[in-house]
Image: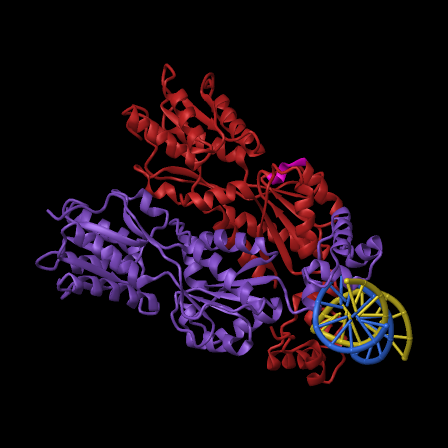
Chain colours: A purple, B red, C blue, D yellow
Amino acid sequence: MARRRQAVTIKHVAADAGVSLQTVSRVINKEPSVRPEMQERVQASIDRLGYVPSIAAQRMSGSRSYLILAVNDRERTIADWQARQGTDWVDQMLLGGMLKCAEHGYRMIIELVDTHDDHVERELAAAIAALQPDGIILTPPHSDNPRIVEFLGEQGIPFVRIGSRENKHGIPLTMDDTRMASLATRHLIDHGHKLIGFIAGSPEYRLSARRVSGWQAAMAEASLSTDGLLAEGDFSYASGERAAIALLERQPRPTAIIASNDQMALATLEVARAKEIAVPEQLSLISFDNTPLVHFTQPPLTAVDQPIAETVSCAVDLIIRAQKGEPLPDGVTTVHGSLAERASVAPPA
Amino acid sequence: MARRRQAVTIKHVAADAGVSLQTVSRVINKEPSVRPEMQERVQASIDRLGYVPSIAAQRMSGSRSYLILAVNDRERTIADWQARQGTDWVDQMLLGGMLKCAEHGYRMIIELVDTHDDHVERELAAAIAALQPDGIILTPPHSDNPRIVEFLGEQGIPFVRIGSRENKHGIPLTMDDTRMASLATRHLIDHGHKLIGFIAGSPEYRLSARRVSGWQAAMAEASLSTDGLLAEGDFSYASGERAAIALLERQPRPTAIIASNDQMALATLEVARAKEIAVPEQLSLISFDNTPLVHFTQPPLTAVDQPIAETVSCAVDLIIRAQKGEPLPDGVTTVHGSLAERASVAPPA
DNA sequence: GTGAAAGCGCTAACAT
DNA sequence: ATGTTAGCGCTTTCAC
């Protein structure tokens, strides 16, 4: 391969505008100490020559790489991609993250890291060393992985912990799982349900417990019992199946179920069909996530929408602000979701 | 922000191993002119110190950036993400591309470019200037956009054109649309169908015409007429609806339809339901793409699977080989798809 | 086979 | 407000 060099460099611009490199650099970085007329002259040269700074060079000298790393769980992400069930978590991350990055001249790079690996730190260190990102976005279950969080805390790189409420290290950012679970529960209570089952997600995800709490709180508030109405799942279809069977064989049978994600809701729907329990007539169902599959089930599922795009967009914002040294919000930043109502909820029989 | 510096650099390794920087560089780049014992000693230091080269620095001096750009159509990609219909084209690209990149120490960066923009070249030039990628993967419809292709041809940067068969510039790589359309058509013919309608995709995509040809060829081979059996679509749901109505109001009515993508197949299914035409009893249906939604339709759709992950993986391979100066395959590289049989095909009534 | 020197494009620190 | 200098971490000459 021929050695490729930057076509137009800061030198060309400087020569063209008849100024020093530094002035061009200042214009690029929007530093205030440049006279408007100077800044215009340089900008004109930049536009004329079609100059775009090389982020490699910017990284080499300055402190910014204009790269943000979005870290996802390797195993689960690859499994989702291979399963082709329409889980669009990564797509929504890209939608929110890439577009926001683009606004600020940043790029987002997806990185897969295995939480269960003995060498998480090494994996992350390698990615950091190679890319020198300006910030890192951690998604569950990484967001609450103590090894990862402590390691990143030591690196001095701003990082956002999506789905975490802890702020000792990094910047916590949640989708308000407790409240959303309460909301879903109240929605069912408002429809007249009293026996509302709940299928929990994997305990490896802190947000699982928060969803359970939200359900419990809403039930308690309405003076309803939750005894024997909680079933453990782990977000997988199979675990949803087991949990649904457990709940639907309970006497008396719950008239409604909330599943902590779409896959487990899908499993519940299937179990109900097998048991000839009509949804929503004999069983109301609400799921979490609102991935594409909720449109296609029979009936379409009422679901708690996780505003992933908006959350990641917000994460990028926080990182860019942190890296500029701007003050960040004090407590836990919260992005609010909503309930997408479809056809899986009806009053109890 | 504190100025972050590389924690462990080539200098540390050189000092630790007691050799010069160049020797370390040679080991990193697997150059042959290093004695095995030397190479082992250096490798030991690298491992001990956990050294990982900075790709920014590698890019600055050398000719490689270890970055591959995957260029997708901005408008369509964002629309797909927002629609949340489960279109997993980008996910499959990541699955195939990221994993293959990782094998070789590369990263893949998704880039959205608007084909219809008057300044495509400028958009691309900016991305190239900023990232200096070692290769670019073009997806339809960019792959056959003459402005893009010529521009990249001048840049001297290896690029793969997915879905293109033209090899004047860049490296063509197809999923064999003609053959796959023939395969689907023959599948229907084997089931006894004679009146097989075809819904074409957007003419902006060259592969649309190839799919039509494949259908025509298979029909001709079986001495079947295609008169009035071709309907124009543009890959959108709405266009599929129009095309399906046109075909299903034809006299005599086709007993089978092939749609050039899943969205148009979904529309056809809906039109058939509205007209009370049972699928597959009165109408067999095959779609292209095999996106997640085919699992969820009633009935699940038999579909031509586009091996996107494999194709992108292959594209990455081709780029890495090109950038190493290795010889590339002569003609058009083809990744073969397959027919995923489900429940939307039956013998005609 | 190995080392020394130069420089990639840019920015921080210091001058002016 | 602008210019000058040094150097980021690495690879590419070119010596030895």
The front one of A37 and B16 is A37
Percent x, y of residue A54: 70, 59
Left or right position of D15 against B9: right
Residue B24 appears in the picture as rendered: no
Say above or below: A172 vs A343.
Answer: below
Quadrant assignment for the N terminus of chain B: bottom right
Left or right position of B282 against A331: left
Percent x, y of residue B36: 70, 77
Say above or below: A114 vs A37.
Answer: below
Quadrant assignment for the C terminus of chain B: top left
Q: Residue at x 53, y 75 (%)?
A: A122
Residue B277 appears in the picture as rendered: yes
Q: Residue at x 16, y 59 (%)?
A: A247
Percent x, y of residue A216: 21, 65
The front one of B287 and A316 is A316
Q: Magenta stretch containing residue B144, yes or no?
A: yes
- Count of marks overlaid on the render: 0
Q: Residue furthest left?
A: A252
**Overall secondary structure of the magenta section:** helix
Say above or below: B145 vs B53.
Answer: above
Q: Magenta stretch containing residue B213, yes or no?
A: no
Q: Residue at x 58, y 33 (%)?
A: B206
Say above or below: A149 vs B138.
Answer: below
Percent x, y of residue B59: 71, 63
Write down the region rendered in magenta: B142-146
Q: Quadrant of residue A239?
A: bottom left
